[in-house]
Image (cartoon, helix red, strand yellow):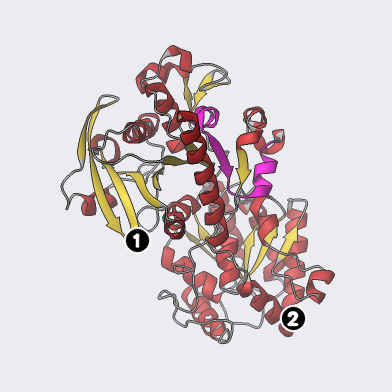
Amino acid sequence: MQVLAVASEIYPLVKTGGLADVTGALPKALSRFGIETHTLVPGYPSLLALARLHPPLMAFDDLLGEAAMLRHLEIDGLSLFVLDAPTLFDREGGPYVDQHGTDHPDNWKRFAVLSLAAAEIAAGALPGWRPDLVHCHDWQAALTPVYMRHIGSTVPVVLTIHNLAFQGQYSSTLLPYIGLPPEAYSVDGLEYFGDISYLKGGLMMADHITAVSPTYAREILSPTFGMGLDGVLNARLDRLQGIVNGIDNDVWNPATDSYLPYRYDAKTIRNKKRNKALLLERFGLEAGDGPLFSAVTRLTWQKGMDMLAEVADEILYRGGRLIVLGQGDHDIENALKSTAARFPGRMAVSVGYNEQTAHQIHGGSDAIIQPSRFEPCGLTQLYALRYGCVPVVSRTGGLSETIIDANDAALTARAATGFQFHPVRPEGLRHALRRAADAYEDRRQWARMQLQAMRADYSWDRSAENYADVYARLTRDRAQSVL
């Protein structure tokens, strides 16, 4: 089966979050089911430096007034179609923001062009190749099925929601500039509270919708988590399915991780203590007998990092240490820095993101903190499990599915892998941190929890099989409808 995936980022070339990890890992996992995936991605500078070493596959003369080339790149087991549209993507900054952290003002056009290019490829624009199915990821690719249906393509489409909070919402006055007729602006199309929503359009036109965990698929049917789209999702409930994300065990493996000073597995987990000592030294923290907690995440309200700034003293007064790595809301960044300034030698905040540092934090920390107010799936806690780093998480979305709370029954059964808390408020997080710190004092029990975490299997194997089943059903249904 030939699949065209469409995404705005992909690991290891372009990454701002978990979306890239998924789009980079899923194609490899699907290959064992006979599924060959080619992923269409924007031609950011980091990709163009490699893709332009090869001649273009084809040219687009008019993508909403823009000329572009389609190039091919194979790297790290991935097959990429790179959309070389220099006026849109070959610029400074990140995929979505400029070098000053401000949204690119033409994001509405950039990702409409990406979707239009995908639709044309799906319709056969690339000589000698046509996909059996299209798989779109998040709002940046969500116009793909809208354009496909507009030009008459009947290739089945899967749309995956990674985070419903990001919807690609723009003024309805842009409708003619994205090449869609007035009838596209309707309750059954892109219309969204007087604006247009790329994601809503995709949800209405896709043949199947997946969310990145079963719990999140249920949560987004409610007004609390539906972000204004719960009515749309309930109307398409028969097309909605939750499939939990996995992780790439080749990338996240403490036994082979080249980023770790000391590698380890379940039998040599003592090396984790050596990594911890180096990690404390690197961040200028004092050594001690207490636990080292860390947070590797976006510093935003959604991720609950304002709560961590408020209750971090629970860790520090009990002899623990805390490292925070991430960036996001400046007020939250400053609040965390202010807390760290009150506890020199015990708390460190590093604003930014670095892949090597993230691996080393997982490889040296005793516990990872994820107090998200909502979390579609979450990958950080899965990486933490793999590295024997005990997660402290809120009971929401994929976090509630992937972490077994260390209650008395789970501890007795030696099944516990972390600590959940609810309600998702500062006092709930404080209580969970207190539980984790108390548990750390029983080193034998803590070691059992670490080993249980490392035994958990959250590879892509099972989830890829679920996606393969979805693909097979959709292509079979399409073939039968043609007959």
Residue ID at (47%, 75%):
282
Quarter of the image holding residue 441?
Answer: bottom right
SS at mark 2? helix
Q: Is residue 157 magenta?
A: no
Amino acid at the residue labelled 2: Gln
- When the figure is inspected, residue 406 is found, relative to residue 373, above or below; the finding is below
Query: Hey, which quadrant is residue 211 in on the image?
Result: top right
Picture residue at 56% right of the left edge, 56% below the top = 463
Q: Is residue 421 above or below residue 287?
A: above
Say left or right for 194 vs 32: right
Residue 445 circle label: 2
Amino acid type, residue under disc 1 in the picture? Gly
In the rendered structure, the answer to whether residue 315 lies left or right of residue 255 reads: right
| Residue 354 location, quadrant | bottom left
The residue sitting at 76% across, 68% down in the picture is: 406
Mark yes or no: residue 372 visible: no
Q: Which residues are magenta?
A: 198-221
Mark 1, residue position: 77
